[in-house]
Image (spheres, grey):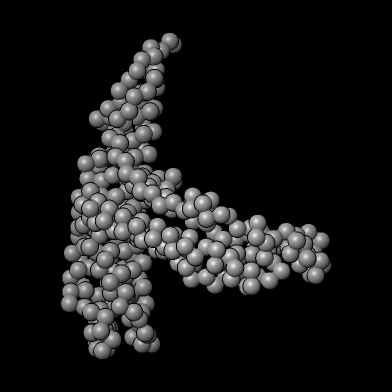
């Protein structure tokens, strides 16, 4: 059967798979941070180890740390890791490409915080560049015969290896795009797009529930009455931060998520880390409430 091929505006007003539009309550954000690892594969040393250990094939690779024990250099990588961790905490997964879902209610907080990370990242890079030549001199002593000056990029080249960028984009409406497509294929496209949209939203919410569940499970474990354990203040703050985010992450006004927020808040009302440390009865009572939440909710 012949098809009429037209440019079709696919407005999926009745998607096969339920996929509530969240384009007005959320956006997509992509964080890209690149750092120079400061590691170099040493072929000759790897070959020496093969000989010493009598391996018939290369059983491992030896990589030199070109800036071993250099706090100024190490600080950049650690800070980049902290920025990524915070980015993942404030956002939800959306696709396999690394793009994350950011709710509009969190946008200004996210933008302020991540811009601060960005400025500090480049400040740390500038500090390392200012000390670049001195770090190479010190590494010559630390690495001994492993030192090779050609392993080190110039300051001009190394600066391009450090990048910190944030990119925002809208969440597309379900099916709001133009394609050259035959009329008979429109239904297939509708089903595929609506399901992908729904799957992404399901993935985002699953991440929220998992993180909340893990925070509560960790609290329960640390409050075990049989063996009093030492814990940090983050035992409580990890849960309270996630509870605060439940409202922000609830882009579809999900009643289950609303109910969970209220129940967890009530269970931890007035609870502080110091109070838990000092009062055995409070600790046991809090654990009992947390365990009830873990059992009651279908995580």
Residue 282 lies in what quarter of the image?
bottom left
Query: On the rendered structure, is 113 left or right of 46?
Result: left
Residue 143 vs 100, above or below: the answer is below
Answer above or below: position of 179 versus 245.
above
* Nearer to me, 238 or 223: 238
**Left or right: residue 188 compared with residue 90:** right
Which quadrant of the rendered structure holds the N terminus? top left
- The reply to whether residue 85 is visible in this rendering is no
183 over 162 or under it: above or below: above
Q: Position of residue 206 (x, y in %)?
A: 35, 54
- Looking at the image, which is closer to me, 276 or 112? 112
Q: Which of the image's four quarters has the C terminus? A: bottom left
Q: Residue at x 25, y 68 (%)?
A: 240
**Observer-nearest of 247 and 293:** 247
62 to the left or right of 57: left
Residue furthest to the top in view is 2
Query: Where residue 227 appears, x then y in whole percent?
Result: 38, 87
């Amino acid at each position: 059967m012949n098809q009429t091929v037209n440019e079709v505006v696919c407005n999926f007003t009745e998607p096969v798979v339920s996929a509530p539009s969240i384009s007005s309550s959320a956006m997509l954000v992509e964080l890209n941070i690149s750092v120079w690892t400061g590691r170099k594969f040493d072929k000759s040393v790897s070959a020496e180890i093969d000989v010493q250990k009598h391996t018939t094939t290369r059983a491992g690779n030896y990589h030199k740390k070109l800036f071993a024990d250099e706090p100024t250099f190490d600080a950049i990588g650690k800070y980049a890791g902290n920025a990524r961790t915070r980015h993942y905490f404030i956002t939800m997964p959306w696709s396999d490409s690394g793009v994350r879902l950011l709710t509009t209610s969190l946008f200004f907080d996210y933008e302020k915080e991540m811009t601060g990370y960005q400025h500090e990242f480049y400040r740390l890079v500038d500090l390392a560049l200012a000390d670049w030549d001195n770090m190479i001199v010190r590494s010559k002593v630390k690495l001994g015969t492993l030192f090779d000056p050609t392993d080190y990029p110039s300051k001009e080249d190394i600066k391009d290896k450090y990048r910190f960028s944030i990119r925002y984009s809208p969440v597309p409406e379900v099916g709001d795009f133009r394609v050259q497509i035959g009329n008979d294929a429109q239904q297939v496209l509708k089903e595929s797009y609506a399901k992908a949209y729904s799957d992404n939203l399901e993935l985002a919410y699953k991440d929220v529930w998992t993180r909340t569940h893990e925070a509560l499970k960790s609290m329960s474990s640390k409050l075990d009455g049989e063996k009093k354990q030492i814990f940090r203040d983050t035992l409580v703050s990890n849960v309270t931060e996630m509870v605060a985010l439940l409202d922000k992450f609830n882009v579809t006004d999900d009643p289950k998520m609303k109910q969970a927020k209220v129940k967890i808040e009530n269970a931890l009302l007035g609870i502080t880390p110091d109070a838990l440390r000092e009062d055995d009865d409070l600790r046991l009572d809090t654990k009992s409430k947390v365990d009830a939440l873990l059992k009651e909710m279908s995580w």
